Structure formats: structure tokens, C-alpha cells
Image: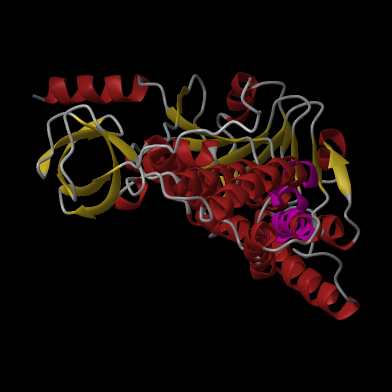
Amino acid sequence: MLMLILALAAVSAQAAPKVIAVDVDSVIHPITVEIIGHAIDQADHENAAAVLLRMNTPGGLLDATREITSKIVASRVPVIVYVTPTGARGASAGFFVLESADVAAMAPGTNTGASSPVLMNGQMDAVMRSKVENDTSAWLRSIVTKRGRNVELAEETIRKAQAFTEKEALDDHLIDLIAPDERRLLETLDGREIRRFDGRAEVLHTQGAEVSVYQASRRERLMQSIADPNIGYILVVLGALGIYVEFQAPGLIFPGVAGGILALLGLSSLAVLPINWTGAALLILALALFILEAKFTSHGILGTGAAVAMVLGAVLLINGPPELRIRLSTSVAVAVPFALITMFLVTLVVRSRNYRSVMGEQALINQIAQARTALAPAGTVFVHGEFWNAISSMPVEQGGEVRVVGVDGMTLRVEPTLPEPPRTSSEPLAK
């Protein structure tokens, strides 16, 4: 029994440590928070040696960044943030994530910093900028101080939008090391003692570690693929167009189904982002102007105003940094075709209301039918490609023509067509 226990202990000691890797290679938003949080939970559950966060981001939402840093500093498993590959960046919000890590590392040819906060809808006044900068600076100082890094220089990334190459960041003690690749990073960290956020000392064991990439759930993969607000906006517009077509032509089915799916996907994409209600109101105004353009003769003024409102509404729709806003090129590329298609469809609908009905009872009135049986006075007539029971006001022989004058349920009321009067010639008779 003792030998079995010793053998199991030896096998356990020889087992390679596990590192859970998770990639952040886009803008930081609420889905990023969810993915990183689940990766940390998995590492804790599997008793992993560390979490390796491979980062390449231009920045993102401040609230999402706060949540990520909170999860990192509270993690039971050490978190290594590695800006990679060559040419990548950990800019703006990415700098906060990098500094919150137990180990901050960068690959050659990368950069970080430039963390000045940007107001969602434009320029900040002096008082607002001071308040935002002081708040984010205090937050960053609390993180960097605990990690034992360069507090003064880290604060300049906010105050002066300072940015650093990987060598500058290492020389100025903003990161812990530079590693050419992931394998070399883990080899270098093996046996290194780190200081956790709560002050505890811990030794890393990463030599020959098995790197297991976190597998995002289906929902996370879907939300990540459509998290770009430009894609979300396009999906919403296409969905709205499909639903509108279905309402105007009931029974097509496909436009309504496809439109509903696209609209819900687009809304779910935009729902995780902060919405500017001024932008939303401009989009609603644009829709109203499109409808008015079809009803009133404005010589294109209402339609042009609707297109302009749609472009402005799209640009202002997202309350976020530039990386998270809908691009002007996207809004124009969507607004112009949507304006033309919508105005065309609405115009057709409005004009169709003035046309004579070609369906139902009204479509049969005054139509010429052929008596398929003798009407004396009841019988059968053929009209509009259909056989109908009919009652005539006068007897009609089989094959005669009658005119529909009324509809009583499933029976037509008809009367014989009047014979054409004989033509009279205006030319004199030959003598």
C-alpha cells in the first residue's frame, strides 16, 4: 500500500503542469470579460499552474476593462499577460490589463500605453477631463503599486497619452520581461517567484507546461464574431428591411424569417455596447422621414434628410471609444442603398392603395363571364379562370356572355351583356 502511494506521488510529481491560454485579439467589450472570466474559472477548476492571456488589442470600454482587471487580481491562479505576436499592441485599455497581471510580458516589436480616456461623444471640457483622468489615474496607480511597477511613468500613459515599445517598457520597469515566443516565455518563468496582489509570494512552475487553449462556448463564439458594431448595425438594417418586405407582401415567409433572425442577432450584438439615445432617436427620425417622403411631394428633401439622419444616427449610436463606434464609411454605405430601397418600396405601397382591387369580390364586379350551362335563371359560369354558380336576371343560353353585377357568398349575380348596336356608315350609298 505504501509503495502504491509513493508510486502515485512520483507520477503526479512528474506530470507536466497545465497552463490555460486565452486570446484577446480584438476590442475589449463585455464578451471579452465573459471569456476571460470563464478561462480563469477553468484554470482554477483544473488546478492549472497559470493563465496565459495572449493579447493584441487597440483598447476598448472602460467598464469592461475594470471588470477584467478585477477578475485578474482576484484570480487564485497566477495570470500572465503576454502582448503577442510581433506587431501586436496592448494599447489604451490593454495597458490596464497588462499592468494588472501577475506577470507582464511582451514580444519583440510590440507596444503598449496611450491610455488617455476618450469621451464617448466627442471633446471633453476641462473639468470633465480632469475628473475622468483623476479617476482612471487613481485606479491605475492602485494596480501598478501593488504589482511593484513604475507608478509615475504608468500614470503618464493617461496624463500625456505616453506609449512605449517593449524595450522601453522593460527598461522603465512597466513590464517584467520580453520573450520571443510562448515556449521561451514559459521556460523563463519557471521557478520565478512572483508577488500576488494580496502580498503572498508564489513560485511559478511552467517548465514543459501543457498549454490548453480555452474553448469558448457557442454563445461566446457567436457573440464574438458579431461583436463588431459595424456588423451589428448592418445586421439590424438588413433585418428591418426583410421584416418590412414581409409585412408588405404577406406570404413570402423567407424575408420575414430571415429578417427576424438578422435583426435579433444585430440587436444582441449592439445590446452589449453602451447606446447613445440621441443616435437611436436619429435612426427613428430617419425611418419616419422615409415614410413621409412616399406620402408627400417634397422633391427629395424628406428622403435626403432621412439619409442624413440615418448616417448621423449610426455614427452616434455607440457610446464608446473610436474603436467601438460605427465607422462613417459603414454608415454611408448602408444608408444610401437602404434609403433608395425603402423609398422605392414605400412608394409602391402607397400608390397601390389607389389601384383597383384585383382580388376578392371587387375584382369580379363588371367582369365578363361565359355561361357554361344555360342560365334559367341559375347555372354555372366561367370567370377569372374559375367556375362559379350564378343566377341571371334573364335567361341565357349555354355559351352566352354575361356581366357580373354582384356577389352573394359563393354565387354570382349576372345579367346578359347588351349586344353592340349596328355600325352606321357615314359614307353615302352608291347609286
Q: What is the x, y in percent for residue 205?
A: 49, 31
| Apparent side of residue 147 relative to residue 423 in the rendered image (left or right) | right
Residue 333 vs residue 86, the one in the foreground: 333
Image quadrant where one finds the C terminus: top right
Image quadrant where one finds the N terminus: top left
Furthest toward the front, the residue is 431
Q: What is the x, y in percent for residue 158?
A: 83, 60
Q: Main secondary structure of the magenta part?
A: helix
Q: Quadrant of residue 105?
A: top right
Q: What is the x, y in percent for residue 386?
A: 23, 32
Q: What is the x, y in percent for residue 35?
A: 48, 43
Residue 36 seen: no
Q: Residue at x 19, y 51 (%)?
A: 393
Image vertical order of residue 342 relative to residue 277, above or below: above
**Magenta-drawn stretch contains 327:** yes
**Range of magenta residues:** 304-330
Residue 180 vs residue 270, the one in the foreground: 270
Q: Residue at x 52, y 47 (%)?
A: 266
Q: Residue at x 59, y 23 (%)?
A: 187
Residue 292 seen: yes
Give the number of callouts.
0
Q: Quadrant of residue 373?
A: top left
| Apparent side of residue 333 relative to residue 368 in the rendered image (left or right) | right
Image vertical order of residue 138 relative to residue 62, above or below: below
Image vertical order of residue 202 relative to residue 212, above or below: below
Q: Residue at x 66, y 63 (%)?
A: 292
Image vertical order of residue 7 relative to residue 299, above or below: above
Colour logic? secondary structure
**Magenta-drawn stretch contains 305:** yes
Residue 353 vs residue 329, the one in the foreground: 353
